[in-house]
Amino acid sequence: MTKQFVCAVDVGTGSARAGILDTNGTLLGRAERPIAMNQPKPDHAEHDSRDIWSAVCAAVRAAREKAGIAAEEVVGISFDATCSLVVRDRQGGQLSISTTGDKRWDTIVWLDHRAIAEADECTASGHAVLNYVGGVMSPEMATPKLMWLKRNLPETWNEAGYLFDLTDFLTWQATGSLARSQCTLT
């Protein structure tokens, strides 16, 4: 029987990490690659999703090489990431979420707090969904970020075709599937 391995990918604030494990859960190879962050204003933190994907691919290749296995032996991959919002146009191209207008910065990072007013507005609404998020909407969640984007960068909002949680973006990049994580849907 051919050996089978899985790849686990974790994207954090400053790096992408990948691990290759056997079917017993033994870590055979691990690698990490940095991710650039832009902070053009206080409370703003932005990533470039192409940079993230490049870091993920490099980390996966390096982890696989350390494990000494062929790509064909990897039978599954999982993604985990921060609660960051990736914005793409209808063709899948990058759209700026930055007040600088630079399209490279298309991802609002989890620690970005530009949407504090929107989060407070959501909390003040008393909506029943708050019962599922601890009673308070955080500016780190998607809803306030989306509200901020619509109000402050209407051109980007109007051109947007895809609004991804970072984990769903990684799945889309890897597979082309627009299926969303259950975590994103709830």
Image (cartoon, rainbow, N blue to C red):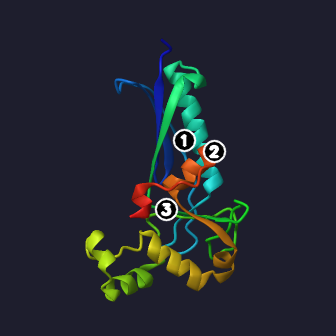
* Quadrant in the rendering for residue 56: top right
Per the rendering, the mark at residue 141 is: none
N-terminal-most mark, 3 or 2 = 2
Measured Cα–Cα span from mark 3 to mark 1: 18 Å
Measured Cα–Cα span from mark 1 to mark 2: 9 Å
N-terminal-most mark, 1 or 2 = 1
SS at badge 3: loop
Q: Residue at x 29, y 69 (%)?
A: 132
* Residue placed most toward the observer, 38 or 54: 54
Query: Is 139 situated above or below 12?
Result: below
Q: Residue at x 63, y 45 (%)?
A: 54
Q: Amino acid at mark 2?
A: Ser
Please tell me how crowded label 3 is: few (under 14), some (14-19), or many (20+) other residues with Cα within 10 Å: many
The x and y percentages for residue 119 are 40, 80
SS at badge 2: helix
Q: Amino acid at mark 3?
A: Ser
Camera-near label (3 vs 1) is: 3
Per the rendering, the mark at residue 84 is: 3
* Residue placed most toward the observer, 109 or 23: 23
N-terminal-most mark, 3 or 1 = 1
Asked whether disc 1 touches disc 2, contact meaning CB atoms under 8 Å apart, the reply is yes
The x and y percentages for residue 59 are 55, 36
Task: Give the residue pinned by disc 2.
Answer: 54
The x and y percentages for residue 101 are 69, 73
Query: Is 12 situated above or below 22?
Result: below
Q: Residue at x 47, y 21 (%)?
A: 4
Q: Amino acid at mark 1?
A: Arg
Q: Residue 147, can we see it?
A: yes
Task: Give the residue pinned by disc 1.
Answer: 33
